[in-house]
Amino acid sequence: MRIAQFLTLSLALSACSTGGDADAFREVLPDNRLLINMPVDFGGSARSNLGDESEYYVLTADATLDINQIIGDVLDGVGEITDFDPTWSNDGGNKALGGPWGDGDINGRLWVRELADGSFDWALEAKRVAEGEDAYLPLFAGQVDSGSDADISGGRFAIDFGALSTFDPSEDLTGEFYVDYAVDGDMSEVMAGWQDFSENGGEPVDAGYHYTQDDTGGSMDLVVEADATGNDVAELNIIRSRWNDTGAGRTDAYLTEGDLGALVYTAAECWDSSYSVVYFEENYSLTSVGDEALCVFTDAEFSDSSTAPAAR
């Protein structure tokens, strides 16, 4: 289920605008600087052999696509609403409402409120048309830190999949997707992840992501808890991928815990701007191919407990 289906904005929204200035609210809400700027282009064999498409590139690129889709849907919907002036704002000018608008039998609205300390709360809510005003459920809700403006901003928001499923009974979703971010001009740092997410009764999934980026490239930490040894015990795989603006990059990863106990196995893989492996090394089977000097980042760089996101 795509989040965007709940973000269809009625053109009638502009017709009922009060004409109030939305700039103060529009500028502090999260924008597309939260989207990951890693170049993505699949097509190879995705094996860790020289000249093949890099497996770690594919893993990292898959994660960026997933994150960008879910965050992008929220940003697109909020941006589409705030392209219009609020349909209502209070006399004090510290609260504004976009909507309500209709999409079939569902009404939606976006409200933003400035608090006394200069921070902001916001939420996108929905309800059935036939229900009363107190039936609105927050689908996405967030806070923006005090002092935020169009250039420098920080905050957080969460997506409630249980609330989304309320409006589409054919989808059985639970859990949350959370985002915590800080942006400064072209630079951004984002912590994101899934918490107790499940679909159609499946096993709940936790996953964490941390990424930083600017106009020269970026890096991403991924935490995956999964059975890597085949003994029904989850090991911890912590991955750091880095890339530049051409798409060339490097991943350094380690596997530990579970059946491995205190043992730590490491791997490194580098790819060029065509996403082909130029270097691969791992100490589990003592494999090493290629030349590390060809890596766009020649030094290994591992995540640790202070930087890796929690798979919570």
Image (spheres, helix red, strand yellow):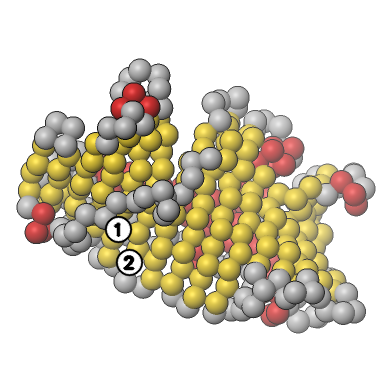
Residue 284 position, x and y percent, is 18, 32
* Residue 42 to residue 31: above or below: above
In front here: 279 or 57? Answer: 279
Residue at image location 68% in from the left, 53% down from the top: 140
Q: Quadrant of residue 118?
A: bottom right
Residue holding disc 2: 217
**Residue lying furthest top:** 231
Q: Is residue 95 above or below residue 53?
A: below
Q: Are marks 2 and 1 in contact (CB under 8 Å)?
A: yes
Residue at the image point whose x is 54% and y is 62% from the top:
181
Question: Is 111 drawn above or below residue 195 in the view shown?
Answer: below
Return the x and y of residue 126 as percentages of the image width and height: 78, 50
Q: Is residue 146 left or right of residue 94?
A: left
Looking at the rendered structure, the secondary structure element under dot 1 is: strand
Pick the front one: 3 or 214: 214
Give the residue displayed 41% in from the left and 27% down from the top. Answer: 234
Q: Residue 285: x percent and y percent?
A: 14, 31
- Residue behind mark 1: 242
> Which amino acid, by three-letter code, is at mark 1?
Arg
Amino acid tagged 2: Gly
Q: Is residue 243 left or right of residue 146?
A: left
